[in-house]
Amino acid sequence: MDFFEYYANLFGTRWDSLREALVRENRPMEWRVGDAESYFLDEASWFAANALAVEPGMDVLDMCAAPGGKTLVLAKALAGKGSLQSNDRSPDRRERLRRVIMNSLPAEYAAIVSVSGYGGERFGRYRAESFDRILVDAPCSSERHVISSKEHLSLWNPKRIKRLAVEQGALLASAVDALRFGGELIYSTCALALEENDEVVKKIMKKRRGLLEIVDLTPKFQGTERTECGLRMLPDLCDGRGPIYCAKLRKVIPPEV
Ligand SMILES: C[S@@+](CC[C@H](N)C(=O)[O-])C[C@H]1O[C@@H](n2cnc3c(N)ncnc32)[C@H](O)[C@@H]1O
């Protein structure tokens, strides 16, 4: 099965308009704090980072942070108080992340941001119960990118979705373990495939049964769709924004024994 067949099966009659919207230019928003350099990011990406509801003084982890648009949103919310660890496994992308932090944040906001390069799967083990908020903006199928690249289209294969879903599940499990009790996380992707979105969330709810609750998210843009566990913003319905899927989970404080 090729890419187009797979998504035509998934979206049925909607696929033609979604496909057109995916290849159209999106409309990024200009994001700026004070005198720092502007950064352009998709409004649906801004939504996912903003939905983490970070407050000054919190300890925050951005597990898959490069190139850094969402890290900027989290750092702005911290306003120079607390800590933000912006992590990404890729050395090249980390360089870009460092530049983005340096250029697009005022120095006092950048001062509490540290950049690291661990595999996100390791945080649960080595930094257990250490963060108040975690963003898991997971590596995903990125169909908007694939559809515009002959090379990526020729390499596309449904097995890739399954492989990514396993990786995403490991990152999310690690995030749950790295979260303090009462802490919250956002799991987000720019994937269309359901296996990379609600299915990943449903698996972790089962695996960590009793430890997590789903937090309701309020849609901001017209055309946002509610899914079983979260929200999805797709460009055909959301005026060019997305694709972004996001779900919010809270780690429940265990009852006293
Ligand atoms: C969707 S992108 C993140 C985009 C970023 N949050 C932003 O808003 O600019 C996913 C990132 O995950 C990184 N990544 C992939 N596998 C990883 C892993 N196991 N641990 C940490 N980062 C990983 C990739 O290098 C990539 O930069």
Image (spheres, rainbow, N blue to C red):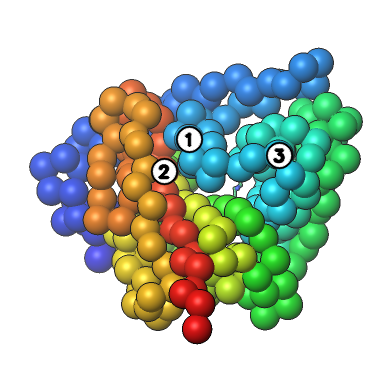
Under mark 1, the amino acid is Phe
Which mark sits nearer the N-terminus, 1 or 2?
1
Q: Is residue 226 above or below residue 196?
A: above
Between the residue at mark 3 and the residue at mark 2, the CA separation in whole angstroms equals 26 Å
Label 1 C-beta lies within 8 Å of the nearest ligand 1 atom: no
Do the CB atoms of the residues marked 1 and 2 lie less than 8 Å apart? yes
Which residue corresponds to mark 1? 47
Which mark sits nearer the N-terminus, 1 or 3?
1
Q: Is residue 183 above or below residue 244?
A: below
**Residue in view at x 66 percent, y 35 percent:** 77
**Residue in view at x 41 percent, y 36 percent:** 242
Which residue corresponds to mark 3? 56
Percent of width and height locating residue 241? 40, 30
Q: How many labels does the image show?
A: 3
Which residue corresponds to mark 2? 244
Which mark sits nearer the N-terminus, 3 or 2?
3
Percent of width and height locating residue 212? 42, 67
Label 2 C-beta lies within 8 Å of the nearest ligand 1 atom: no
Secondary structure under the numbered disc 2 in the rendered image: strand
Disc 1 residue crowd, few under 14, some 14–19, many 20+, Cα 10 Å: some
Secondary structure under the numbered disc 1 in the rendered image: helix
Q: In this view, does 246 lie above or below 130?
A: above
Q: Which of marks 1 and 3 is in front?
A: 3
